[in-house]
């Protein structure tokens, strides 16, 4: 499990475009696309878009979709997102994230 001070980090490049949490607008009253989980959503979007982490143009780690979703869950845990919010968000990406992954 990760921690805020872990040496294992995913750096998202400046200027990366994200939609934060991809929550349908009719659900924003319950889960807005931004919040305490915002940084986790940015990392998740980055990994979903690239399927890998690069350093100096060299791929240092590749992801499958399940691993990318687990990174999202772990990042929300590190950020202190409450259990009643993080698990529904995690299961939403597990169940409905397939199209975005492709």
Image (cartoon, rainbow, N blue to C red):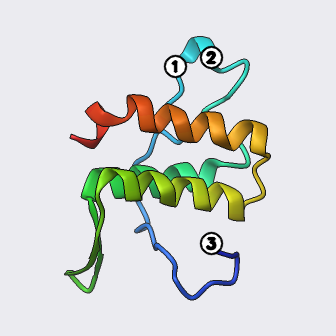
Where is residue 71? Give x, y as percent.
50, 60
- Label 1 crowding class (10 Å Cα cut-off): few <14, some 14-19, many 20+? few
Badge 2 element:
helix
User: Which residue is at 53% across, 54% downward?
Assistant: 72
**Left or right placement of residue 44 versus residue 74 in this view:** left
Q: Which mark is drawn over residue 24?
A: 1
Where is residue 18? Give x, y as percent.
44, 45
Q: Check contact, mark 2 vs mark 1: CB within 8 A.
A: yes
Counting residues from the start of the chain, the first of labels 1 and 3 encountered is 3
Which quadrant of the figure contains the N terminus? Answer: bottom right
Q: Which mark is drawn over residue 11?
A: none
User: Which residue is at 79% across, 46% downward?
Assistant: 82
Counting residues from the start of the chain, the first of labels 3 and 2 encountered is 3
Where is 45 relative to 88, above or below?
Answer: below
User: Which residue is at 46% across, 37% downward?
Assistant: 93
- Label 3 crowding class (10 Å Cα cut-off): few <14, some 14-19, many 20+? few
**Left or right placement of residue 80 versus residue 94 in this view:** right
Where is residue 47? Give x, y as percent.
36, 58
Q: Which residue is mark 3?
A: 1
Mark 3 and mark 2: Cα distance apart in space? 29 Å
Where is residue 4? Give x, y as percent.
70, 76
Q: Which mark is drawn over residue 27?
A: 2
- Label 2 crowding class (10 Å Cα cut-off): few <14, some 14-19, many 20+? few
């Amino acid at each position: 499990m990760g921690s805020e001070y872990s040496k294992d980090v995913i750096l998202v490049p400046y200027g990366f475009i994200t939609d934060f949490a991809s929550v349908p607008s009719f659900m924003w009253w319950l889960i807005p696309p931004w919040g305490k989980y915002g940084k986790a959503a940015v990392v998740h979007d980055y990994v979903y878009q690239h399927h890998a982490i690069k350093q100096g143009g060299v791929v240092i780690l590749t992801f499958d979709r399940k691993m990318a979703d687990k990174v999202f869950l772990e990042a929300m845990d590190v950020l202190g997102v409450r259990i009643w919010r993080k698990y529904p968000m995690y299961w939403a990406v597990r169940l409905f994230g397939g199209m975005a992954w492709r």
